[in-house]
Image: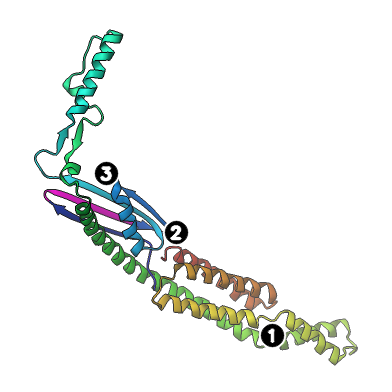
Amino acid sequence: MILSMTGYGSGSAQKEGLTISVEIRTVNHRFLDLHVRLPREYLFLEGEIQKLVRKVLDRGRVDISATVQNSSSAAFTINTNLVRLYMEAAERLKEEFKFQESLDLKAILNLPGILQNRDSAQVDDAEAMSGLIDTCMKAALEGVARMRSHEGDALQAEMTSILSVIEESAQRIHDLSLNSAAEHMQKLNDRLSQLLPHGGVDPQRLAQEVALLADKCDISEEIARLESHINQFHSLMTGNEKAGKKLDFLLQEMQREANTILSKSGNLDVSSNAISIKAEIEKLREQVQNVE
């Protein structure tokens, strides 16, 4: 199952004039990297938000932004006790340091903590707040899931196309390798004939040398493993589990087999196809980086 790590979703919920809105944006990341932005008075909801995300997402950077709006006529309350403390402190400073001015209304209203958002005062029931955030998050995560699925379909189509090119090159290497022993014998025989033009080549010794050379250059196991990895790649793309990490591992193994084929084979056509496979694997790697 191919799911992209790129997604967006939003949700909102209301209760007694209070509106909570949530936006979720996700991009690719090796692990699940959560970032939650909440109003200060609602930071206690962060743990619940992370728990909801972890139930749905396994990988990716996830940015969650929650906003709170109060439609009531009096959205703020004044902390009169704090005002009194500020005034007393100001009077002490004025007496001790002989300041000429005192705090005015504008200065008082700008002091930290004087004006308090009534959102937290109106909805101080943690269970009710959890219900609102749960509704928002579920709607937003559903949007993220839809977008990730849609983007995943496009990724799968692109990766299938690239994989077909790798399969064609692997098949050509397989076909070329079938005649490798005969080619080695012919090349060695021609070379020895040039060096020993009067027929001094021992056929039995020639066969032994060719057998040793063929064994050294044999790439049948690498081809078989490469074909197996390709089949596993197809299975993961069409299976029911999230495949990103396994696909990334398979690409490492496919690259290893291509490198071994390239180092062992002396056939130019085989080498050319192995290089083509390596290039296509890199294209696949770019796509897999965004697969959950």
Residue wearing tag 2: 31
Q: Which amino acid does label 1 sit on?
A: Ser
CB under 8 Å between discs 3 and 2: no
Q: For residue 204, which quarter of the picture?
A: bottom right
Chief SS of the magenta region: strand
Q: Position of residue 53 (x, y in %)?
A: 33, 59
SS type, badge 2: loop
* Residue sitting nearer the eye, 78 or 73: 78
Camera-side residue of 288 and 36: 36
- Does the stretch in magenta take in 136? no
N-term mark: 1 or 2: 2
SS of the residue under disc 1 = helix
Label number found at residue 39: 3
Q: Position of residue 38 (x, y in %)?
A: 29, 46
Which residue range is magenta in the image?
16-25
Q: Which of marks 1 and 3 is in front?
A: 3
Q: Label 2 is placed on what type of residue?
A: Phe
Alpha carbons under labels 3 and 2: distance apart: 26 Å
